[in-house]
Image (cartoon, rainbow, N blue to C red):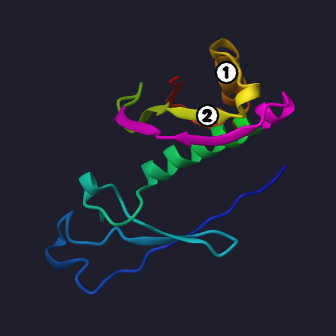
């Protein structure tokens, strides 16, 4: 099986522990992938994070949406349907899980897919394609959050 890596680096800043309050240290960090791509990360703004950085919950939502899209494209390709564009405004919700702990409890995918005009699936076929993509998506198979694919 394959292995996937990310390097997470955080370094204390000059004023990080002034006053010893939850607000007093920076959550800003770097996420670096093996290809050298770097993302500036932080916690969510609600948890004293930096609004100019990406929070882990958004990265999870993006990972699920990305995986679903790539799997959907493979499903479409196998059915000889040419996708011209794919756009998803995915939304994740934080709530309490069954154990009463905070978790990303629901992610709604809102994919909008444009096909070659002479080879567009009907609504039922499109729904089945998304269902197949969801069942085969590695990330969806790895998380406990409810995942909804809106049409």
Residue 129 vertical placement versus 72 (above, below): above
Which residue position holds label 2? 113
Confirm whether residue 50 shows in the render: yes
Give the percent coordinates (x, y) of residue 75. Answer: 78, 31
Q: Magenta segment: does it hold 48?
A: no
Q: Secondary structure at mark 1?
A: helix
Residue sitting nearer the eye, 48 or 118: 118
Q: Residue at x 61, y 34 (%)?
A: 113
Image position, residue 110 (x, y; %): 50, 32
Answer whether labels 2 and 1 touch (C-beta < 8 Å). Answer: yes
Q: Is residue 138 visible?
A: no
Q: Closest to the observer: 53 or 127?
A: 127
Residue at 30%, 65% in the rendered image: 50
Residue depicted at 69% across the width and 71% down the height: 34
Q: Position of residue 124 (x, y in %)?
A: 66, 12
1 sits to left or right of 71: right
Q: Which residue is mark 1?
A: 126
| Magenta stretch, residue numbers | 74-95
In the displayed structure, 129 sits above or below 95; it is above
85 lies left or right of 73: left
């Amino acid at each position: 099986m394959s292995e996937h890596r990310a390097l997470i680096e955080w370094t204390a800043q000059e004023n990080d522990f002034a006053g010893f309050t939850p607000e007093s240290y920076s959550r800003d960090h770097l996420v670096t992938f093996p290809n050298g791509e770097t993302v500036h990360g932080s916690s969510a703004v609600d948890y004293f994070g930096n609004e100019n950085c990406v929070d882990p919950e958004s990265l999870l939502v993006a990972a699920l949406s990305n995986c679903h899209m790539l799997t959907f494209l493979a499903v479409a390709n196998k059915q000889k349907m040419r996708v011209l564009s794919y756009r998803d405004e995915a939304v994740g919700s934080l709530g309490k899980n069954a154990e009463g702990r905070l978790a990303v409890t629901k992610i709604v995918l809102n994919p909008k897919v444009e096909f070659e005009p002479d080879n567009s699936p009907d609504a039922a076929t499109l729904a089945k394609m998304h269902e197949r993509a969801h069942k085969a998506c590695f990330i969806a198979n790895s998380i406990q959050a409810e995942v909804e694919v809106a049409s």
